[in-house]
Image: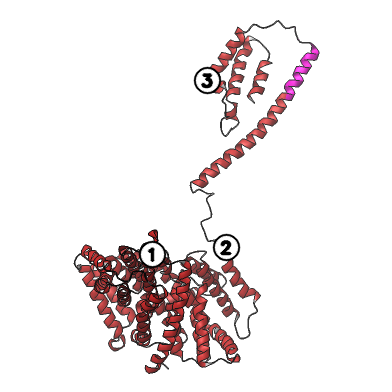
């Protein structure tokens, strides 16, 4: 471009009046890249641009004056026409070339600006919304059920639509295109827009007492972690019985069972209290995956502590959040447990304690420790207790409040105080004394998250039951089971195995229970199982299958992530323990439930 402008300047009519024009054209030629929006300077900059346009024009003019020129004859008319044609051709080419160059330069500049804004998180940054693949799967499942599968006889279109919406919601909670509350709210929005649900029906469970108990349970768990009372209880037991590897495993299981009574989050209890303790004790005894010594004590202790969580969660009604949800769902079918705390403890105590007593022995056989003595464990526990110092005022207040709540929960029928009233009273005491602050409660994102999607899912489940979907589904499947010649004990055992082993497809105990608990209760009852046997058996199973895989429960990835147990051994141990737990709970449980009159 600059060369073309310089050519035009050279052939410009001569004369003193034109000198200023020549200088101006040369200056324009020197800055022409800027005039046409060049995105960046060429690799080798011409000297004109470095010196400055006006100064270089004067230098060039001086050089021309210093060079002697030959005397030229005046151009002939033919030569003039040739010069004019060349000028016109050059000018037209210059105009078209500059126009194309401007377009390319503008495109390059625009792309550079957009790329830079994208790197800074601007308008062109990557999609930050729902994961489109899992979302497509969830929506596709719902559309398949609603529009491709014919509506069965005896089922209303609204009921079938709610079933499709419910299944799609559970699928979304499993595949997680969004966090669980996001999936629940999207499903609620679809239900409202399609008039499948009213707003009151979609959020009805937000006033449910059981869901508020789940929420308050997380706040009490925060109290244990904030004050350090949970760590103190666990360390005290380890100090007493931790001299051998097997004794240490029993001590950890004993502490797990004690804390489960007042620490209602199995994930927080197992992953937040006991895994750090197991990891610390294992490394103190020379068992470290980084050094290839994980089988000395670590693998055995990790599996023993992890497998104990399912049984300790089953022992106490408040041992896990899904226990409360199970009773709430059972009540939707009309199976109401009158004294929840005591009836649950009465049904669970013997099989749970039996399984907890045998769990370390099974681990000792299946994944034996290389080191049998652990004199370092009591010393490590003693050292940590000294670091914690004496029992603080907040620990004492929390311990007294939890003990008082356990008494009121155990005697709720005699005292006439509902369980949720006791929980509200306990939380109020902790807030009043400053053991907990409202900032602590508001910061428990897991509590509010669970409350949100629990409530929406339970509301949908209640509508399924209200519109007869659960009854129809149970009657259809149980009819096929009866046609196969199964009933009573055989049907119960088959349905229980299907319910348990289907957890290989789930990454959440609560999602599994929310999706399958109600229909399996109905199927068991329709095939001859006593109602409360079905209620409690499936509720207990919802705890023990949380140890089957590295993703089977919220605490599983934490224990597996320590690298003490290989993936192959983890699945092997999961299969061993689920078979062991089914044998104990069905064998011992069936005898005990007969003794207490459950059937």
**Measured along the vertical axis of the image, is residue 509 above or below residue 46?**
below
Instruction: Tell me where residue 281 sits by quadrant.
Output: bottom left
Quote the CA–CA distance across marks 3 and 2. 59 Å
**Nearer-the-camera pick, 188 or 574:** 574
Q: Is residue 184 above or below residue 151?
A: above
User: Could you classify mark 2 by the number of other residues whose Cα lies within 10 Å: few (under 14), some (14-19), or many (20 or more)?
Assistant: few
453 over 26 or under it: above or below:
below
Q: Is residue 69 visible?
A: yes
Tell me the quarter of the image containing the N terminus: top right
Q: What is the secondary structure assignment of the residue under circle 3?
A: helix
> Residue drawn 46% across and 92% down?
530
| Horizontal and vertical percent position of residue 112 | 55, 41
Q: Is residue 460 visible?
A: no
Residue visible at 25% across and 79% down in the picture: 404
On the image, the x and y values in percent for residue 103 come to 64, 37
* Residue wearing tag 2: 133
Q: Which residue lies under the disc numbered 3?
A: 51
Considering only order in the chain, which callout, 2 or 3, is on the residue closer to the N terminus? 3
**How many labels sit on residues?**
3
Residue that badge 1 annotates: 294
In the displayed structure, 152 sits above or below 1; it is: below
- Whichever of callouts 1 and 2 sits on the residue coming sooner in the sequence is 2
Left or right of residue 22, residue 592 in this image: left
Single out the residue that lies furthest toward the right.
Answer: 78
Q: Position of residue 399 (x, y in %)?
A: 24, 74
In reply to whether residue 468 is colored magenta, the answer given is: no
Question: What residue is at 64 percent from the left and 6 percent from the top?
Answer: 68
Point out the stretch of residues depicted in magenta: 73-89
Quadrant of the image containing the C terminus = bottom left
Label 2 SS: helix
Closer to us: mark 1 or mark 2? 1
Left or right, 236 with respect to 561, comes to: left
């Amino acid at each position: 471009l600059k060369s073309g402008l310089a050519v035009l300047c050279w052939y410009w009519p001569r004369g003193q009046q034109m000198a200023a024009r020549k200088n101006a054209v040369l200056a324009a030629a020197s800055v022409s890249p800027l005039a046409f929006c060049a995105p960046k300077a060429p690799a080798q900059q011409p000297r004109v641009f470095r010196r400055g346009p006006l100064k270089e024009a004067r230098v060039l003019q001086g050089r021309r004056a210093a060079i002697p020129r030959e005397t030229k004859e005046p151009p002939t008319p033919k030569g003039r026409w040739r010069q004019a044609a060349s000028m016109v051709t050059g000018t037209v080419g210059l105009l078209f070339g500059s126009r194309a160059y401007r377009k390319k330069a503008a495109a390059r500049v625009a792309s550079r600006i957009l790329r830079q804004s994208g790197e800074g998180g601007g308008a062109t940054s990557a999609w930050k919304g729902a994961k489109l693949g899992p979302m497509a799967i969830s929506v596709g499942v719902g559309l398949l059920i609603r529009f491709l599968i014919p509506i069965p006889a005896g089922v209303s279109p609204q009921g079938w639509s709610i079933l499709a919406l419910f299944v799609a919601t559970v699928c979304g909670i499993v595949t997680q295109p969004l966090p669980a509350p996001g999936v629940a709210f999207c499903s609620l929005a679809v239900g409202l827009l399609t008039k499948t649900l009213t707003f009151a029906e979609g959020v009805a469970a937000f006033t449910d007492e059981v869901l508020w108990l789940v929420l308050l349970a997380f706040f009490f768990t925060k109290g244990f972690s904030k004050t350090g009372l949970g760590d103190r209880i666990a360390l005290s037991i380890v100090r007493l019985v931790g001299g051998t590897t097997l004794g240490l495993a029993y001590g950890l299981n004993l502490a797990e069972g004690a804390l489960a009574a007042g620490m209602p989050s199995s994930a927080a209890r197992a992953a937040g209290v006991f895994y750090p303790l197991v990891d610390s004790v294992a490394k103190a005894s020379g068992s470290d995956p980084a050094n290839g010594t994980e089988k000395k004590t670590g693998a055995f202790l990790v599996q023993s502590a992890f497998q104990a969580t399912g049984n300790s969660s089953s022992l106490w009604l408040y041992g896990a959040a899904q226990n409360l949800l199970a009773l709430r769902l059972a009540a939707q079918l009309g199976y109401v447990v009158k004294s929840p705390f005591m009836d649950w403890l009465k049904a669970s105590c013997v099989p749970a304690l039996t399984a907890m007593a045998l769990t370390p022995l099974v681990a000792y056989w299946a994944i034996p420790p290389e080191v049998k003595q652990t004199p370092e464990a009591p010393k490590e526990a003693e050292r940590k207790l000294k670091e914690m110092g004496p029992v603080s005022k907040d620990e004492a207040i929390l311990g007294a409040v939890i003990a008082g709540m356990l008494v009121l929960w155990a005697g709720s029928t005699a005292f006439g105080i509902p369980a949720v009233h006791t929980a509200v009273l306990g939380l109020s005491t902790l807030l009043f004394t400053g053991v907990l602050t409202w900032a602590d409660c508001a910061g428990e994102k897991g509590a509010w998250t669970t409350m949100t999607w629990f409530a929406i899912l339970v509301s949908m489940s209640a509508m399924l039951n209200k519109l007869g979907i659960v009854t129809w589904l149970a009657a259809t499947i149980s009819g096929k089971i009866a046609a196969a010649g199964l009933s009573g004990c055989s049907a119960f055992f088959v349905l229980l195995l299907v319910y348990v082993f289907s957890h290989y497809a789930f990454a959440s105990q609560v999602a599994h229970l929310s999706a399958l608990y109600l229909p399996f209760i109905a199927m068991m009852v329709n095939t001859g199982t006593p109602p409360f046997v079905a209620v409690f058996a499936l509720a207990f199973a919802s705890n023990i299958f949380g140890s089957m895989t590295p993703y089977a429960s919220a605490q599983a990835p934490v224990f597996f992530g320590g690298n003490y147990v290989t993936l192959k051994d983890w699945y092997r141990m999961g299969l061993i323990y689920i078979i062991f737990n089914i044998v104990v709970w069905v064998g011992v449980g069936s005898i005990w439930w007969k003794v207490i009159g459950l059937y």
